[in-house]
Image (cartoon, rainbow, N blue to C red):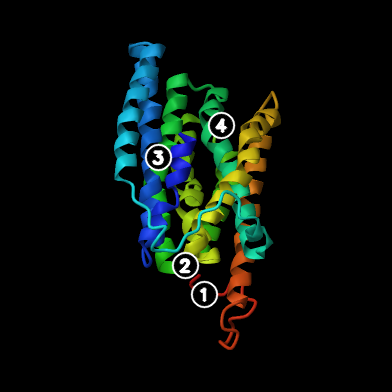
Amino acid sequence: MGLMFVASFGIPAQWFTTKRSLASGFATCGSALGGLIYSLGANAMIENISLPWAFRILAIVSFVVNTGSSLLLRDRNTQTKNRPAIFEIRLLKNYNFLLVLLWAAFSLIAYTIVLFSIPDYGESEGLSADQGALLGALVNLGQVVGRPGVGFLSDRFGRLNVSSVMTFLSGLLCFIFWIFAREYVSILAFSLVIGLFVGTFWASLAPIVAEVLGLHETINGLNICWMVLVSPVTVCEIIGLVLRKPGGNEYLHVQIFTGALYVAASLCLLLLRRQMVRNRDLSKPGAAGLIFGFTKL
């Protein structure tokens, strides 16, 4: 699954110029929709058919859908003068790209913890397994709407502007909503609302890499992103489990850690935005050194 998804992730950005973020948002919301269907469907099949047949049905559906999608995919490497490389190490000398990597790492670690912790968090608060599965489905439902929404707003107000705000709001929600969501209804509401924001990484990564490196280096930049992100994402859920403490709100440290990661990620984007504004035409009034002043970027 990783080989299929990662290989196709940067393709939508090659086909669009003015609506690149919206295109990426729609392309990536498919995985959220699949997560929504799988969360509800897999649980129902396990209960009503059997675990082996649930796996078989999911495998058949995945094979048919992914085979058809793979046959329809077309890249534009020739037209965009892409020279794909496994690891273009010279890109690591680009300060702006390093900030993108930090944002990506912090965001994806936090995203993974949220996505896989919400169902178990619900069960730790006394909910059933079915209710926990519904929580995971609601996170994905929020992303079905949120990812294209982030893409639309990014094209209108600037990719770095929108992504930094959405990433910060993800962290803020962890601090002011998740920590205090202890009842079923409030956890349901949090799951849906956080889903609107946590998919920002998936909708924005490829367009931001294209913005920073140029379209001709987008594939190489994404290659480095995935290779760098492998290690932290592999262990992030283990970290989430270790941070759980028995008694009271056992997920408190997880919630604080996740919120802090999102805030740190948003700061990385603010620094990137500041640097890119400085690199623009410095003769324009107020162009240099702005972090919070509005510039579409």
Query: Mark 1: few, some, or many residues within 10 Å (few <14, many ≥20)?
Result: some
Q: Secondary structure at mark 2?
A: loop
Please state if 103 lies on the left or on the right of 12 as rendered. right
Q: Mark number for residue 31? A: 3
Q: Secondary structure at mark 3?
A: helix
Question: Which mark is in front, 4 or 2?
Answer: 2
Q: Mark number for residue 158? A: 2
Q: Residue at x 70, y 29 (%)?
A: 242
Q: Earlier in the sequence, mark 4 or mark 1?
A: 4
Question: Which mark is in front, 4 or 3?
Answer: 3
Q: Amino acid at mark 2?
A: Gly
Q: Amino acid at mark 3?
A: Ser
Q: Amino acid at mark 4?
A: Ser
Badge 1 vs badge 2, beta-carbon distance below 8 Å: yes
Question: Which mark is in front, 1 or 3?
Answer: 3
Query: Mark 2: few, some, or many residues within 10 Å (few <14, many ≥20)?
Result: some
Query: Mark 4: few, some, or many residues within 10 Å (few <14, many ≥20)?
Result: many
Q: Is residue 235 above or below residue 267?
A: above
Question: Which mark is in front, 2 or 3?
Answer: 3
For the residues marked 2 and 3, what is the alpha-carbon distance in whole angstroms?
24 Å
